Amino acid sequence: MELSLDRLTKHYGSKIAVDCVSATLKPGVYGLLGANGAGKTTLMRMLCAILESTSGEVLLDGQEITSMGADYRNVLGYLPQEFGFYPNYSAMEFLLYVATLKGIPKGIAKKRAKELLEMVGLNHVTNKRIKTFSGGMKQRIIIAMALISDSDLILADEPTTALDMSVSNSILDLLLNLKEKGKTIILITHDLSIVSNYCDSATIMYLGDIVEQASSKELFKNPRHPYTRALLAALPSKRGKKLENIKGTISPITEIIEGCKFHPRCKFAMEKCKTQKPVLFNGVSCHLH
């Protein structure tokens, strides 16, 4: 399976939320990183075909996803940050309801739902109503929902939010096991350790632009974009190295920035950074490379 993004763009009036993003994704685990407002969730919603792009397209094995209808939904598992539940449904009833919407036969659905509830650590509350669940338990139900159809493409927006460390690790291990079955998994996360430990590849976004793409190993070993370097420099070091802060604040999406969008905060900025927008080349979008 191959998912291709071709110059995918989303505008809200004069605001640019995602700016001409292109990428090709094959089976594996991809980390999507960036601060709030970087455009990660907007990009994810376009990949799910629940938000229409302003321009560009998303292709699955050469076919535009908006033309695929139910065929695309059947290969897609989506873990949103927030999701509305039927509060009076039990965990099992909710998963069976989702399975029905996806056309999964009842016998297969019940067996799959039971397996998933055990995987996400909710087998002890199978018949309890969702309205009695904590935030972390509801997050686990969302994860089970996304996996009910054994999807080939899994998009996860902060999948470990509100989960304790042990449950978080078990969920990430589950996603890692799915990779071995030939799945394509995209994780939105703020947690660099998740990218380092679980992702094959990492993409860094800043104000709607992809500023760097690399294997996770290469990204942590040799970050090239100044924003990526600054993110890693802000991580605690075992050597006791002083943490660095990124100067300034992220510009609001309403502000139009000429040239490189990171240049107002970049200590390496040159004059052309203020007027010429860099293009993504060899995995980095920066005039220094």
Image (cartoon, helix red, strand yellow):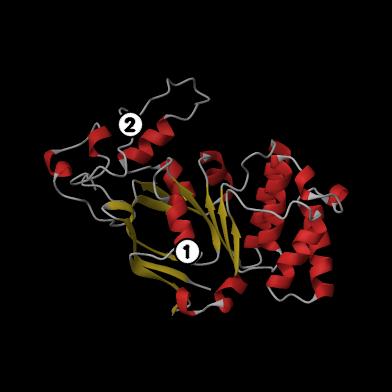
Q: Which residue is mark 2?
A: 249
Q: How far across and how far down the image is residue 254, in percent? A: 28, 44
The residue located at (79%, 54%) in the rendering is 91
Image: 57 above or below 257: below
- Tag 1's secondary structure? helix
User: In the drawing, what numbered circle is on residue 47?
Assistant: 1
The residue located at (79%, 66%) in the rendering is 112
Q: How far across and how far down the image is residue 52, in percent? A: 41, 66
Mark 2 nearby-residue class (10 Å; few <14, some 14–19, many ≥20): few
Q: Quadrant of residue 222?
A: top left
Q: Nearer the viewer, residue 234 or 282?
A: 234
The residue located at (87%, 53%) in the rendering is 127
Going by the image, does 268 lie left or right of 213?
left
User: In the drawing, what numbered circle is on residue 109?
Assistant: none
Image: 220 above or below 91: above
The residue located at (69%, 37%) in the rendering is 165
Going by the image, does 40 lie left or right of 122?
left
Image: 266 above or below 215: above
Q: Mark 2 belongs to which amino acid?
A: Thr
Mark 1 nearby-residue class (10 Å; few <14, some 14–19, many ≥20): many
Going by the image, does 165 lie left or right of 122?
left
Q: Quadrant of residue 73?
A: bottom right
Label located before the other in sequence (1 or 2): 1
Q: How far across and how far down the image is residue 90, in percent? A: 81, 54
- Cα–Cα span, label 1 and label 2: 28 Å
Q: Nearer the viewer, residue 141 or 270?
A: 141
Q: Mark 1 belongs to which amino acid?
A: Leu
Q: How far across and how far down the image is residue 179, in percent? A: 62, 61
